[in-house]
Amino acid sequence: MTTTHTVRALDATHPVDYLAAIGLLACVSDGSVQFNESNRPVLLTPASAETTATEVTAELERWTNPIHSALPTSLQSTTPDWPQLEPLCRDSWQNPITDGHLRTFDVGSAKDPAHRPLQVLSAALMLVTGKSYLRKSLEDLWPAPSRKKDVQAARDRTRAELYDGVLALLCGERPSSVRGGMALRLTTSDISPRLRSGTETALLTPTIEALAAVGIFHLLPRQRGITVERGQGRRPQHRAGLTWALNPAPLSLRSLVDIHEESHPPPSWPRFTCVVQTIGGGTKAAQFTHIRPI
């Protein structure tokens, strides 16, 4: 028997909510997802909402809790040197978590081949840069307590909050937002609070931040959004971003990702695109812009 969960709080015409839908599907052991006429994800799984929420919460912790991170604490950049990533790349063949975390780096490219060691570019969908590197951003989702003896209690509290957020999604409701660290800047209402108030804290939705991160972990590092015409006689510019399609029929995670990466969905499927663009104004952090249907 299949249970249907319509995730009404996620609007897949927005890139973050689409990525969160991929992350949700990636966290269930036996499920599929389709998008209804209102562009809302519909998760199909044999389990109840409570059982699914427990499973998804455990997977979110496995993928996002820094204590399980495949990335060493010494790797404090979104554009590291290749020698730092080389041993991780070897391990990634056997470790899916390592492989996923490495997808936040474009290991097939170098920022400046003229200099050694080669500096690797960040993946297209990573909105954090500079000191806001991946591991630190994930730590914002699992805030450390002020006292060491409270570590377990803090972890249990975050786990319970994620469970409540996932269950809310499965029941068609919006998870709670909190004021805290910038995390991955996927759901922050103010994308540049430091410029306005001199602080890095912002209002974000941790459950959707975590799910969207897992979605990013399952996509290839190089993603393209809008192709911009640059005038007569000049080649079009392919801007980093995301182009995605909403499948009306149920697909497994592997099928959904395969169709996305091959960029050949059926023409009848609704399609959307966006660009990843630097916020500017003194910060190198990025945001999703120019979101539109194709």
Image (cartoon, rainbow, N blue to C red):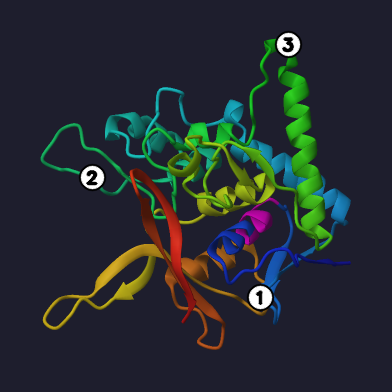
Q: Where is residue 272 shown, x and y percent of the image?
A: 50, 75
For badge 3, the amino acid type reads Lys
The amino acid marked with disc number 1 is Asn
Instruction: Answer whether labels 2 and 1 touch (C-beta < 8 Å).
Output: no
Residue range in magenta is: 21-27
Identity of the amino acid at label 2?
A: Ala
Q: Residue 97 at x, y = what percent? A: 55, 40
Q: Work out whether 9 lies above or below 151.
A: below
- Up the image or down, 32 lies above or below 114; here it is below
Query: Does residue 146 appear in this view?
Result: yes
Magenta segment main secondary structure: helix
- Cα distance, mark 2 to mark 1? 37 Å
User: Which residue occupies 44% across, 36% down?
Assistant: 132
Foreground mark, 2 or 1, reads: 1
Residue at horizontal 21 percent and vertical 37 percent from the top: 118
The stretch drawn in magenta includes residue 12: no
Q: Which residue is mark 3?
A: 149
Q: Earlier in the sequence, mark 2 or mark 1?
A: 1
Neighbour tally class for label 2: few under 14, some 14-19, many 20 plus, Cα within 10 Å: some
The residue where tag 1 is placed is: 39
Label ID, residue 110: 2
**The residue tagged with tag 2: helix, strand or loop?**
loop
Of tags 2 and 3, which is closer to the observer? 3
Q: CA distance from mark 2 to mark 3?
A: 43 Å
Q: Is residue 25 magenta?
A: yes
Which residue is nearer to you in this view: 72 or 166?
166
Residue 73 point in image, percent of width and height: 46, 23
Q: Quadrant of residue 84?
A: top left
Q: Nearer the viewer, residue 94 or 102?
A: 102
